[in-house]
């Protein structure tokens, strides 16, 4: 089946690649174009002497091109796909070179799938898990001591290097969650208004987390699961799918946002059960420059089951058994007070919650000095976070009330999706 | 907080300042107590966030009932090359559509640095754009000021826009408005406004322009002289004709020329302030009605006499100002390849559209491909379909010439819509084609799709 343009856009590594790919989507530049159920292929005349042979295996999808580009997929593969979605590629028989490549790939993938798994030794696995728990507990205890020393000496003396040093020791102790918290804390030093206050709050919450980490076995199971997650214990997705809580609903895709760091691109997809009202977070990861796996587009509704990770306030989930997303109209949202209540409830169960999804109905922008707040029909207002560019949202609203999906935390609202009538748009 | 900063070693934790709900949780060693208190307090504050209750509200913009551009056009906007943005905005406005509002801030930023985009953007942005312009002073050009208020209270740009529009729809009212404020306008603004008037020049403007020849500002004097030279019935044209008759005489097979006196105050007033004798002569001939020369034969015969280049420069100027097609054709045909510049290529505009394609062929035959490539950029815009087809045909006849990239880029964005299905865009890439060919084909295809998808 032919892809939609959105599907092509979803496999592109970055926006410049889309533009470059579009530029390649001129039928005049190609010879030997063809498409079968399994693949699309063609030869593209580039700057080199010989044309580049480009082929896309549609199953995975996988890409191959004889050009030297290190982008993946390259602009030729994207151009080929754009041509195909435009209907400019005729159906045809796969030529020899395409068949050869498809066969090679099938062999390689088959080998990987049939490779015998490492023999399982439950005893050894249990021993390793126990060792890890001991090391984390030791790391957590060390962190608590350091924090106590630090507070005795005064936070004014804390410097970035010192925090990074402790973070590195937490990595050695296999507690990446504690290390991440320390690095976040280091990033606060000297930045913005009231940084000592925020630094103290961050370190104090880490102190509580480390405390919980030293007595994991005494905690209730749900809370222990939350603490383990926050400490950075790995969680087996197969286990979540097999035994995690299953919730069936019509899930609104409220917002999709990508966070790009040097080492990783993280995509957060916020879902909201239309019937149960439950929020859910689906995470996807990719190395920089690589395409993210296909996720649901904002503003659509997907019927199906999510499998939730264990925890005291289960939020993160995996798509277990989901239909195709369907375009939907403007959803019902909450008032400011209802949104804050849901956040307070979640925070009571998971004190380390970083951000919370809110879907605000009929909020209008109001200027508060140089800052902006969104005010609901009851007159209650929440501020936009400091680093948010307010203008796209302001342009959609133009003073009128709008429905907005945001992430909320102590720093303010971060609007992600806005509805202009029934049209959803990513901000 | 201050205890945390200074250290528990120096200062005691005082739980009395904590909220009642938090106090009982604060126990243990001083450090332990402080950290626990801070953690509980942090979440106490986060969970207990009290929403603000602002008492002001903003007015909402009028609802924009125009339909949104189709989805394909919305996706295209994200990969629109900046040089095509103006064309796209004008097309969207012409179709009576609006752009997705979430893109208005990025478009306004683009128009902030490129003033040419401002009028078409303000038109498609509509009330939402106006609302944004009132909130963000850097985008004030998006604010629409309606009716006559624009003339009295608008920004200079809006006032010029108003004058331009009103000169087309109600010329009498426009001229009255201009006259009523003229003496109070700053010099720079007078020059801009008189240039706008020049876009709608009529013979009745002559008395006003004649007084402007004595304006305090040099720019205004120069503009007035330029506009009067375009009116063959003006007093200035008559004075120039008299000077030309005195200074330029046939002598055998050539023209005998006397240079004008650079201290002639009357001449300096009419020539817009230059003093160089050769340039003065060019301006005299350039402002002399072309029918002055008919007694010496057809334009071809006049041009056949040997002459100093300065005369030809004057005739080019006159043909352009007076819109004289036979003179334009003769000047193009007789042009010296070494001195083809923008004033010469401007002659193409004087010809009826059906002659544009042959005119391009005449130029191409005179010039080397490299020189022709430079001349393409000087062809008068907007191009007619015939002119565009002529340029594309010329490019298509040099597929392997790698030096034509600049001309191809100019052609790609300048040819009118009627040229977008030229064989360069639709036929397969020729073997050995230079890189510009593919780029040009891409641009033409991009523009064709861009216009077609607005019709769906």
Image (cartoon, coloured by chain):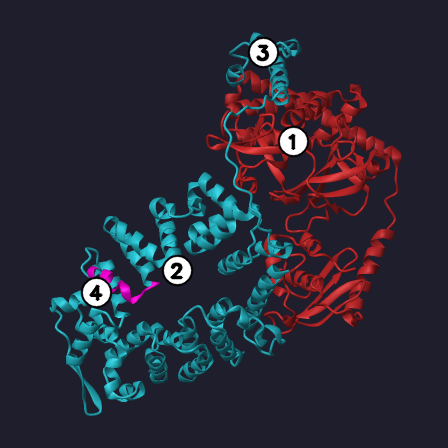
Residue at mark 2? B168
Q: Nearer the viewer, mark 3 or mark 2?
A: 2
Q: Are marks 1 and 2 in contact (CB under 8 Å)?
A: no
Drawing shade for chain B: cyan
Q: Quadrant of residue B447?
A: bottom right
| Residue B79 visible to the viewer | yes
Residue at mark 1? A355
Looking at the rendered structure, the number of numbered marks drawn on it comes to 4
The tag earlier along the polypeptide, 3 or 4, is 3
Residue B28 versus residue A12: which sits nearer the camera?
A12
Q: Estimate the spatial distance between the alpha carbons at disc 3 and disc 2, rounded to whole Å.
A: 73 Å
Q: Have a look at marks 1 and 2 and say if they share a chain.
A: no
Query: Please, which residue is most extreme toward the bottom here?
Result: B252
Residue at mark 3? B18
Residue at mark 4? B272
The tag earlier along the polypeptide, 3 or 2, is 3
Q: Estimate the spatial distance between the alpha carbons at disc 1 and disc 3, rounded to whole Å.
A: 25 Å
Residue B271 versus residue B48: which sits nearer the camera?
B271
Q: Which residues, given as a range, are shown in magenta?
A: B199-211
| Residue B306 visible to the viewer | no
Q: Residue A119, which numbered label? A: none
Label 4 chain ID: B
Q: Estimate the spatial distance between the alpha carbons at disc 3 and disc 4, rounded to whole Å.
A: 82 Å
Q: Estimate the spatial distance between the alpha carbons at disc 1 and disc 2, rounded to whole Å.
A: 58 Å
Magenta stretch, main secondary structure class = helix
Q: Estimate the spatial distance between the alpha carbons at disc 2 and disc 4, rounded to whole Å.
A: 28 Å
């Amino acid at each position: 089946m032919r892809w939609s343009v959105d599907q092509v856009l979803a496999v592109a590594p970055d926006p410049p690649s889309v533009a470059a790919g579009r530029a390649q989507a001129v039928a005049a530049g190609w010879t030997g174009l063809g498409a079968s159920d399994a693949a699309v292929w063609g030869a593209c005349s580039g700057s080199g002497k010989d044309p580049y042979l480009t082929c896309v295996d549609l199953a995975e999808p996988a890409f191959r091109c004889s050009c030297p580009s290190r982008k993946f997929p390259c602009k030729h593969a994207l151009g080929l796909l754009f041509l195909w979605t435009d209907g400019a590629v005729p159906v045809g028989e796969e030529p020899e070179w395409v068949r050869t490549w498809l066969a090679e790939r099938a062999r390689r993938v088959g080998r990987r799938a049939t490779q015998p798994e490492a023999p399982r030794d439950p005893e050894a696995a249990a021993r390793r898990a126990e060792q890890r728990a001991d090391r984390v507990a030791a790391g957590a205890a060390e962190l608590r001591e350091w924090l106590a020393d630090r507070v005795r000496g005064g936070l004014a003396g804390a410097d970035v290097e010192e925090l990074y040093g402790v973070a590195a020791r937490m990595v050695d102790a296999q507690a990446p969650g504690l290390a991440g918290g320390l690095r976040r804390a280091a990033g606060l030093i000297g930045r913005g208004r009231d940084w000592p206050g925020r630094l103290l709050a961050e370190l104090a919450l880490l102190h509580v987390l480390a405390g919980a980490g030293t007595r994991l076995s005494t905690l209730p199971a749900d809370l222990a699961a939350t603490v383990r997650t926050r400490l950075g214990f790995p969680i087996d997705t197969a286990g979540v799918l097999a035994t995690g809580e299953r919730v069936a609903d019509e899930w609104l895709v409220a917002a999709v946002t990508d966070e790009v760091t040097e080492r990783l691109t993280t995509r957060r997809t916020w879902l909201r059960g239309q019937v149960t009202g439950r929020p859910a977070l689906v995470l996807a990861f990719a190395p920089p420059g690589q395409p993210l796996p296909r996720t649901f587009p904002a503003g659509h509704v997907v019927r199906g089951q999510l499998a939730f990770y264990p925890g005291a306030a289960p939020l993160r989930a995996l798509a277990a058994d989901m239909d195709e997303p369907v375009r939907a109209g403007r959803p019902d949202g909450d008032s400011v007070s209802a949104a804050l209540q849901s956040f307070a409830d979640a925070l009571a169960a998971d004190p380390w919650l970083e951000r919370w999804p809110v879907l605000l109905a009929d909020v209008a922008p109001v200027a508060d000095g140089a800052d902006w707040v969104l005010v609901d029909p009851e007159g209650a207002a929440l501020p936009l976070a400091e680093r948010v560019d307010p203008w796209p949202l302001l342009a959609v609203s133009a003073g009128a009330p709008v429905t907005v999906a945001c992430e909320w935390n102590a720093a303010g609202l971060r609007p992600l999706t806005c509805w202009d009538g029934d049209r959803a748009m990513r901000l | 907080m201050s205890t945390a900063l200074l250290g528990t070693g120096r200062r005691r934790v005082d739980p009395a300042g904590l909220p009642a709900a938090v106090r009982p949780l604060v126990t243990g060693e001083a450090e332990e107590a402080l950290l626990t208190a801070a953690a509980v307090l942090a979440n106490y504050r986060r969970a207990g966030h009290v929403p603000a209750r602002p008492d002001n509200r903003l007015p909402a913009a009028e609802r924009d009932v125009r339909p949104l551009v189709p989805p394909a056009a919305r996706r295209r906007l994200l990969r629109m090359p900046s040089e095509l943005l103006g064309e796209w905005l004008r097309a969207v406005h012409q179709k009576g559509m609006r752009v997705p509002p979430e893109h208005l801030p990025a478009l306004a930023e683009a128009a902030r640095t490129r003033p040419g985009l401002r009028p078409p953007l303000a038109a498609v942005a509509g009330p939402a754009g106006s609302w944004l312009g009132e909130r963000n002073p850097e985008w004030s050009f998006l604010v629409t000021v309606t009716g006559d208020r624009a003339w009295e209270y608008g920004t200079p740009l809006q006032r010029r826009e108003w004058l331009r529009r009103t000169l087309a729809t109600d010329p009498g009212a426009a001229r009255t408005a201009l006259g009523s404020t003229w003496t109070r306008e700053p010099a720079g603004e007078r020059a801009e406004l008189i240039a706008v008037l020049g876009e709608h020049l009529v013979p009745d403007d002559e008395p006003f322009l004649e007084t402007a020849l004595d304006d305090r500002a040099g720019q205004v004097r120069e503009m007035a002289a330029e506009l009067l030279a375009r009116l063959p019935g003006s007093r200035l044209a008559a004075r120039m004709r008299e000077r030309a008759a005195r200074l330029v005489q046939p002598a055998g097979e050539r023209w005998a020329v006397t240079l004008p006196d650079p201290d002639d105050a009357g001449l300096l007033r009419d020539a817009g302030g230059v003093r160089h004798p050769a340039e003065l002569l060019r301006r005299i001939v350039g402002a002399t009605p072309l029918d002055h020369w008919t007694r010496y034969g057809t334009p071809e015969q006049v041009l056949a006499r040997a002459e100093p280049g300065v005369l030809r420069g004057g005739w080019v100027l006159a043909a352009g100002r007076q819109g004289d097609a036979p003179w334009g054709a003769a000047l193009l045909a007789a042009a010296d390849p070494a001195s083809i510049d923008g004033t010469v290529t401007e002659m193409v505009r004087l010809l009826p559209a059906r002659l544009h394609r042959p005119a391009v062929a005449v130029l191409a035959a005179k010039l080397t491909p490299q020189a022709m490539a430079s001349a393409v950029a000087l062809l008068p815009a907007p191009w007619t379909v015939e002119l565009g087809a002529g340029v594309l045909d010329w490019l298509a006849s040099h597929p392997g010439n790698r030096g034509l990239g600049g001309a191809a880029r100019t052609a790609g964005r300048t040819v009118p819509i009627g040229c977008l299905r030229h064989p360069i865009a639709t036929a397969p890439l020729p073997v050995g084609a230079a890189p510009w060919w593919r780029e040009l084909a891409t641009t033409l295809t991009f523009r064709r799709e861009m216009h077609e998808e607005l019709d769906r």
